[in-house]
Image (tube, helix red, strand yellow):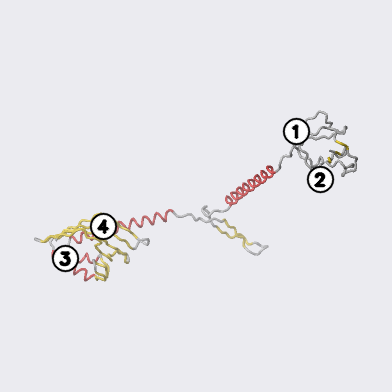
Amino acid sequence: MKYCPSCLSQYSDLTLKFCLQDGTPLSALPVKQSTIETVAFSQPLTVQNLQPTGEFKDSSIDRRLTSPELCVARLKPRSSGKGLIAGGIIFAILVTVAAGGVAGWVYLSKRPGVARDQKVSISEAEPNTAAGKPEVQTDVSKNLKPDPDANSESSADIETVKKEIAVLIENWKDLIEGRNAEKLSRMYGEKVEYKDKNGVTGAELKAEMQKTFDAYSMIEIVISNLLIAVDAEGDAATALFDKEWSYEASPKLNEGKSHTKLHFRKIGNEWSIVTEKDLKIYYIED
């Protein structure tokens, strides 16, 4: 084994006499070879491309290379910079995201919201002599909040309609028990759906009611489970309730119970019954 005293290149070819790097005469290695296997390199081995193969401890090695001995020192591997690069990239991403969030928050906080109370006032000032146009000052703000009073008024109107319909049903019941066909027929519209007939006129209603009232001497009506629904416009309402009746005429007696529907519609300023129908008959005793 030979080496170059100048550049420390090693050669396994014993026939070489001069260094292939700088032409310096080669010298034989005087030191004892280590137990490490000799590796043949396709290129001459130099200190620059020598990789650490282990720790060598020899007190005779002079770092100044004053003796013709080969100095093989353990080279510390360089720490990889990949971790630092990855950490820097992650830190840059976090900083970018945080900056974007702060910018978005500042933008939204400064942006005029639709829920804010805003007033619009435009006042004309003294004419601008330079531009020849009046100077207009504006204070931009629009109140787009929902008006709670409007909802309150709507709810109040619905409750008022329900009370009106409840009173009308009570009057309807009293007129049946009083067997007053004249006034009872006036509570209905010009043409109505009555029982199982459509387009019944007021005169036809009055005649049919009078016939029933003449057949009985006493009538009793009991109304329960009243439910009233009002439409959005407030000009129509539907009442559902259970009706129990007792028609007496010695020695006849007619009793029964039904689930009845009365549909009201407001014509002008007055409510009229446009539909009367028994949705379900619970029982009839005659």
Query: Which mark is nearer the camera, 1 or 2?
Result: 2
Q: Name which residue type carries label 3.
A: Thr
Nearer the N terminus, badge 3 or badge 2? Answer: 2
Report, in whole angstroms, how far the alpha carbon at label 3 lies from the one at label 2: 127 Å
Q: Quadrant of the N terminus?
A: top right
Q: Provide the secondary structure element on which disc 2 rests.
A: loop
Circle 4: is it few (<14), some (14-19), or many (20+) Cα within 10 Å? some
Q: Is residue 248 left or right of residue 203?
A: left
Instruction: Read off the residue under disc 3.
Output: 212
Report, in whole angstroms, how far the alpha carbon at label 3 lies from the one at label 4: 22 Å
Instruction: Read off the residue under disc 2.
Output: 43
Nearer the N terminus, badge 2 or badge 4? Answer: 2
Report, in whole angstroms, how far the alpha carbon at label 1 lies from the one at label 4: 103 Å
Q: Name which residue type carries label 4.
A: Phe
Compare residues 134 and 18 and report the one nearer the observer. 18
In the figure, 111 relative to 87: above or below? below
* Contact? badges 1 and 3 (CB < 8 Å): no
Q: Position of residue 78 (x, y in %)?
A: 74, 39
Extreme residue toward the front, this view? 15
Residue drawn 16% across the image and 65% down it = 212
Compare residues 25 and 215 and report the one nearer the observer. 25
Nearer the N terminus, badge 1 or badge 2? Answer: 2
Instruction: Read off the residue under disc 4.
Output: 241
Q: Is residue 218 left or right of residue 148?
A: left
Residue drawn 35% across the image and 57% down it = 158
Quadrant of residue 10 within the rendered picture: top right
